[in-house]
Image (cartoon, rainbow, N blue to C red):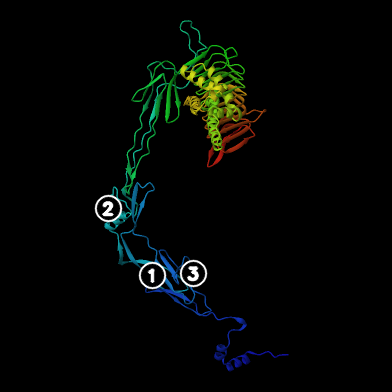
Amino acid sequence: MSRYMNEDELLSLIKKMNLASELQAEPLAAGLASPGTQSKVKVENNKIILLDGTAEAEFASLEAVYPVQLLRNGKVLHERTFLEPGDHIDWQVDEQPLFRMEVTADKQEAYLQIRAKQRYGWRLKEQEARAHLIVEAEEDPNVVLESVSFAEIMKQLQSKGIVKNLRTSAIFQELQQPSGERILVAQGVPPEPSEDARLELYFSEEVTSELKENEMTKTIDFRNHLQIPSVKKGDLIARKFPAKSGVTGYDVYGELIHPATPKDITLIAKDNVEITGDGEVYAQKEGRPRIMGNASIKYFDISTSYVISGDIDLKTGNIVFSGDVIVYGNVTEGMIIESLGNVYIFGNVFQATITATGSITVKGNIIKSNLYSGYFGVIFNRLYVSCKALSEQLVMLVQAARQLSQMIDSRGQTVPLGQVLLVLMESKFKDIPRLSSEALDTIRSLQRISAKELEDLKEKVLILQNSHAIVAFDSYNPIYSIQNLVEETYLMVERMQEVTANIDVDQAHLANLKSTGDILIRKEGVLQSQLFCKGNIIFFDRNSVCRGGQLEAHGTISAMLVGGDYGSETILKAGKRIMLQRMNSGRICVGKYWKEILTPIVHMTAYLQDRGLVVEGQQG
């Protein structure tokens, strides 16, 4: 058993030990290492000096305050960095130019911004050695490296090509008292815009309904309450204001800026209109003034009206008229009205087809009928359809005849041209006789067309039904002559499309309505109908309904009560906006976005916002 050492014995033993030599020879016990010497960094005489410590010590670190940039062994440091023995530390200042120029995107204005009049040298703030150093620098006002001068600014403006309307006084003032703000130092002259030609009309294009009392009989005239726009001979109906060219401008570089070329309008007068040299349009007869054409070409005419006091039925036959058609009765089952103008119907329309290159107005009910106005009145017009198809067939007939004749010639044989044409018509172009018959039927039914046009067209088309006449053709000229006249006929119908072409009705059931302009529903509304227009669809009566079918407008749809508790789905498609007093159910679409309405919504508005569909309203 070991004996316990007392304190005296312990002190005696310590005195006998050589502590200096033993401690120097052996490190601390239990694996503990020496702390060594910490590496440090300091700033002295504008230099950054790294003081290495022992190998076992922690590394020093440093960072800089802008605009000082530190470089470690030639590479820029962007954050606090720990340094290693042997690292070489340099520094620099990230300096901005004393002034800068800026030209606006439209090149109409040039700006100068002076940040400072002089650039001074920089020196580092002295700092004692420490493990972590934040390097800072300060300007030395005794060392001027660079100064801004008027000559230097002008030189830079010139080098950039900025030469027009220089504001030298503003540059002088800014040099004397720099504000640090952007100042305008050069300015171009924008071009004065051109003015497009415009047309001013002096008549109303809208049809109104007004009940008037007969002064003699003191009774209300219910038959003639529709007020159709009309002018008298000699009335000024329109005036063209000519296009005006703008004035050329220039930018700060002196480059010319030309205004856009103004758009002109060409006026063409029909037989019943006179156009003066200064662009005034006068009526040469009484009637409804018409404007046809497109944005660049306007045709003016005074439309003659064809009036039917009773119904359109088998007794009257179909109505095909080159002007306005006014019907005081009904249009009965299976009948057709084709107008190269407007159509006004005071009664009902039953299972009929109405086409008009202008507008269509119906005061009664429309049931299971087709109404086409404007461009749709053109493409559904039988004369247009038959003549266009016939013209296209005649063009292809000539192409085929030329190809066949070349094949015959290549074999060293000969066949008369007339025989080639006839054989092709009997084999490959069997539609030509049928189309010519359809065109003749439509031509014969026209109630108004000039005698010369009628006779020429009939005479030319009849040739296509005469095989003996075709065999006698020894050149392509007769076919060209027929094709040109047929083409001019359908182009004439196309030109009859009026600028304003709406469909204006009170109610419709199981109907199909297509219009270039607006579709206006004045009273009860529409049931199970298809409506399409390039303008707007508007319901006026607060109690009007829209149940079933599909309504599509490139513009806005404005309706009252939409959808029902039962029946087929109601679909509304608009290009811009849908506004409804109440929608019970159905589907709405604005642009490319759809939404199914399953529960009633009142005071509903649907529109596009940030490429999405927004539907506002209250639960009904």
Mark in the foreground, 2 or 1: 2
The number of numbered discs placed on residues in the rendered structure image is 3
Q: Residue placed farthest to the right in the image?
A: 1
Label of residue 559 in the image: none
Q: Which residue is mark 2?
A: 173
Left of 477 or right of it: where is 138? left
Q: Residues within 10 Å of mark 1 (few under 14, many from 20)?
A: some
Q: Which residue is mark 1?
A: 125
Mark 3: amino acid: Thr
Which badge, 2 or 1, is on the more N-terminal residue? 1
Q: Residue placed farthest to the top in the image?
A: 217
Out of 97 and 242, give the one closest to the viewer: 242
Residue 284 lies, in percent from the top left, at 39, 17
Out of 620 and 69, give the one closest to the viewer: 69
Q: Which secondary structure, mark 1? A: loop
Q: Which secondary structure, mark 3? A: strand
Mark 1: amino acid: Lys
Which badge, 2 or 3, is on the more N-terminal residue? 3
When asked about the image quadrant of residue 291, the answer is top left
Q: Which residue is mark 3?
A: 81
When asked about the image quadrant of residue 4, the answer is bottom right
Out of 417 and 242, give the one closest to the viewer: 417
